[in-house]
Image: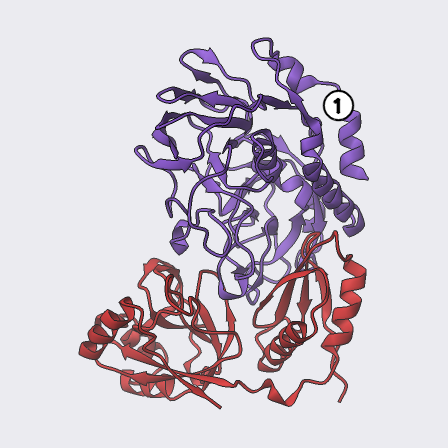
Amino acid sequence: MSLLVVDSVGPATSVQDAGRHGAQRYGLTPSGAMDRLSLAAANTLVGNAPFAAAIELGPLGATFTARGGAVRLALTGAERPAAVHGEPIALYESFVLADGETLTLGIARSHVFSYLAIAGGIGGEPMFGSLAVNARAGLGSPYPRPLQAGDTIPAQPASSAAERSLDLPKPPDGPIRVVLGPQDDEFGDAVAAFLGGEWKVSATSDRMGYRLDGPEIRHLHGHNIVSDGTVDGSIQVPGSGQPIVLMPDRGTSGGYPKIATVITADLGRLAQLQPGRPFRFQAVSIDDAQAAYRGLAKLIRALPDRLQDAQQGTLDLDALFTANVAGAATNALDS
Amino acid sequence: MALTIPRMLPSGDAAITVEFAREISDAANQRVLALDRMLTAHAIAGIRETVPTYRSLLVHYDPEQIGFDALAQQLTTLAQSPIANDSTARRHWRIPVCYGGEHGIDLEDAAATLKMTPDDLVARHAGGDYRVAMIGFTPGWSYLSGLDPALAVPRRQAPRLLTPAGTISIGGVQTGVQCLPGPSGWHLLGRTPVRTYQLHRDPIFLLEPGDAISFNRIDAKQFDEQDRAAEHGELIAELELS
């Protein structure tokens, strides 16, 4: 058994997977990765199932050291400096961290979350089928809390497999798509203000919810409704008129009216928006939202087909990020 | 009498809110729980999980297996079928509560607001017959229906950021059993040593939506004893099957 030792780590860094489902009726929120496509990409690169548990890294830097043997890793999501003993490590490409070597990750340059997957997955005890951290409920493994310096993560020793790289379709850059409701009738004309406004993610956002700065959204009949169920992406509007997009650590029910719901295919993109960066919402039909859902699911299932042998030492990051695959992206997401 | 047709509201691309009422209503909650039971008995392919609340049933589903219109149609049909006679709770829990003092710091203020003595408030609260209307917000937080309307009291102006595990409180026309420490804008009447959510215990979740609940008063010494036993995994709550 190898170990990945956490030498230093910023806040909002935790083990996540696809979350634990089936107990929302008891008030247990699913948790799980903020950006599922990036999680799936990292896992695919090291040969894991797409939603195996991996390390979700917040925007600050971190360092990890392999102990007791080598481990194979892959880093996806936010662009950030990554190096082993001063040698740059490419994103979206698997690599081996030899026994005693240290991986140094810098601050995210774009986006918010990165995913560090370990070949063979993370050793831990699943609860309700998941290792995802939900600190409030005391759940998560190997630690039921965000990672801290000194933590050790059990891992499989690296095999002699060849390194792989992966290019994802360029993500759409347009508005964040929503399906209106379930309580858009509580807002009247304010729905137009919501759809027409320019929004920014507030710096006070976290894994429970993203607070949005923008026009004040007024309710027709006050902000208290009788609690009902929430989903990932529910956009609730409290009395302040400042919407909150509920994220995977949300409460399972809430008593504020929900004007709209971010579509599944765009939730990871919203999660990756840095605070202060302007964006807009766009209402789409349920049919269009579900087509995008199926497109994302298909893309994730087909990630192994996109793997290529890594060309070590000749990687051009710019080329990787601007690779002409937009056409494929459109097909995969819209079909 | 024909049952009203619930509203089928989209909660994004992978969930439907089946809304029976916009207000807290015992009749609506009965229909929520009845539909929930029907979906357990007659599974619809593509449904992932259901979340009952006071007035609606949230149905999570897989859009790769079933679309909104097809699912909404099936749910509409089911929701109008007659509610079976077994809709009364079959499980009845007796939950001990230590009212007032350090365990219920709002008892006296709430009684003053309601223009009754603290003893009167406790007697009315402990004398009620309740049902778990929904469990939500945080693990094990059980919202009950059946509060004596004379005990309805506006929520606190400023919510408390931290209230203790096991808090029994009232707010608006609602009462509830809170499991984990957390924020609350309700009035704290007492505490129970019962854990409605406890890892490494069987069952992890004690209560189910629809269960009947009654409270019995214990003193602070009994609370301490039962709290220690509960910490080691004892259920403490007494179950009667009816």
Residue, far top: A314
Q: Which residue is mark 1?
A: A325
Q: In front here: A181 or A216?
A: A181
The percent position of residue A151, horizontal first and vertical second, equals 33, 36
Q: Is residue A244 above or below residue B211?
A: above
Question: What residue is rendered at 38% in x and 48% in y?
Answer: A144
Q: Is residue B80 above or below residue A151?
A: below
- Kind of residue sitting beneath label 1: Val
Residue, far front: A160
The percent position of residue A306, horizontal first and vertical second, equals 70, 28
Q: In front here: A127 or A24?
A: A127
Q: Chain of mark 1?
A: A
Badge 1 marks a residue whose secondary structure is: loop
Q: Is residue A142 above or below residue B109?
A: above
Question: What residue is rendered at 68% in x and 41% in y?
Answer: A265
Q: Is residue A22 visible?
A: yes
Q: Is residue A196 visible?
A: no
The percent position of residue B146, horizontal first and vertical second, equals 48, 83
Q: Colour of chain A?
A: purple
Question: What residue is rendered at 45% in x and 23% in y?
Answer: A107
Quadrant where the N terminus of chain A sits is top left
State the count of labels. 1
Q: Colour of chain B?
A: red
Quadrant where the C terminus of chain A sits is top right
Q: In front here: A26 or B24?
A: A26
The percent position of residue A77, horizontal first and vertical second, equals 56, 29
B168 sits left or right of A240 in the view: left
Question: What residue is rendered at 49% in x and 91% in y?
Answer: B242
B174 sits left or right of A189 in the view: left
Categorize mark 1 by other alpha carbons within 10 Å: few (<14), some (14-19), many (20+). Answer: some
